[in-house]
Image (cartoon, coloured by chain):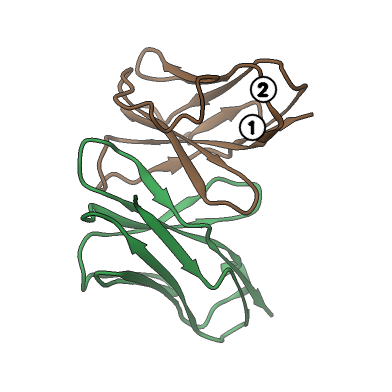
């Protein structure tokens, strides 16, 4: 069974204090690994898709990386508006389109 | 353009009653997904549609849950004889097609409370 574990569950940073969120996954083959951002009371917002080990993608202060067992979401010099819950998800090969999500990391950036 | 919309935004129902949750996907998106998000738990995949067809319904929690999609557009998730454990936020997402290369766009969700 596909599994996604995110750590830490919660993270509090000072504005400008860079850090990384971890997503460990177990899947029989990997079709894609996804990162989403979710604000309170809203649906998740897509950030990145990574397909293979060694791949990296960047968007503003966020950079996602992927190895064969885990992914990291690096946040450089965060701002208060980066406060949200960050979700990681994986999709395995095959006709079944199931996506397995982790519980998420709740990030709070303090001014 | 318009995003994914869901209705109602909030629903409070009594245990044992049936509820219908509606999802309007982004126009032209052929794939549609339903998820459930409970407090302290990750998003739980329920079912997906490619067009009007749901190839695999094994993610539905019980036979009280059913879903349909008509005209390749609007989808309805029905929960019969609701139970308190059904209380959660139900999220719908759509994408241009199925597969990892097509990002999913989520709606705001329907918060269901069963009393």
Q: Residue at x 51, y 83 (%)?
A: A77
> Residue B79, position in %: x, y?
59, 20
Q: Is residue B14 above or below residue A90?
A: above
The chain shown in green is which? A
CB contact under 8 Å: marks 2 and 1: yes
Q: Residue at x 64, y 32 (%)?
A: B86
Q: Is residue A55 left or right of residue B76?
A: left
Q: Is residue A45 left or right of residue B72?
A: right
- Residue furthest to the bottom: A17
> Residue A95, position in %: x, y?
21, 35
Q: Is residue A52 above or below residue B43?
A: below
Chain of the residue on which disc 2 is drawn? B
Quarter-of-image position of residue B22: top right
Depth check: give the residue in front, B112 or A74: B112
- Residue furthest to the top: B71
Chain of the residue on which disc 1 is drawn? B
Identify residue for label 2: B82
Depth check: give the residue in front, B91 or A30: A30
Mark 2 lies on a secondary structure that is loop
Q: Is residue B37 left or right of residue A72?
A: right
Q: Is residue A54 left or right of residue A101?
A: left
Q: Quadrant of the C terminus of chain A?
A: bottom right
Q: Residue at x 23, y 56 (%)?
A: A30
Q: Residue at x 53, y 61 (%)?
A: A104
Depth check: give the residue in front, A24 or B99: A24
The chain shown in brown is which? B
> Residue A103, position in %: x, y?
53, 57
Identify residue for label 1: B86
């Amino acid at each position: 069974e596909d599994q996604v574990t995110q750590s830490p569950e919660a993270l509090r940073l000072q504005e400008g204090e860079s850090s990384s969120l971890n997503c460990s996954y177990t899947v029989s083959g990997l079709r894609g690994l996804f990162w989403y951002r979710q604000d309170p009371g809203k649906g998740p917002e897509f950030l990145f898709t990574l397909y293979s080990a060694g791949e990296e993608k960047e968007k503003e202060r966020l950079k996602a990386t992927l190895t064969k067992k885990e992914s990291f979401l690096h946040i450089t010099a965060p701002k208060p508006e980066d406060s949200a819950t960050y979700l990681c998800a994986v999709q395995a090969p095959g006709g079944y389109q199931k996506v397995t999500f982790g519980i998420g990391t709740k990030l709070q950036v303090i001014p | 353009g318009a995003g994914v919309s869901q209705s109602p935004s909030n629903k409070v129902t009594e245990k044992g009653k049936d509820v219908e949750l509606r999802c309007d996907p982004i126009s032209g998106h052929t794939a549609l997904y339903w998820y459930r998000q409970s407090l302290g738990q990750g998003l739980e995949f329920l079912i997906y549609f490619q067009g009007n067809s749901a190839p695999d319904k094994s993610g539905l929690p019980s036979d009280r849950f059913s879903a349909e999609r008509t005209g390749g557009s609007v989808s309805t998730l029905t929960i019969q004889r609701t139970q308190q454990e059904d209380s959660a936020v139900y999220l719908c997402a759509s994408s241009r097609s199925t597969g990892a290369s097509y990002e999913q766009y989520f709606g705001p969700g329907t918060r269901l409370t069963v009393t």
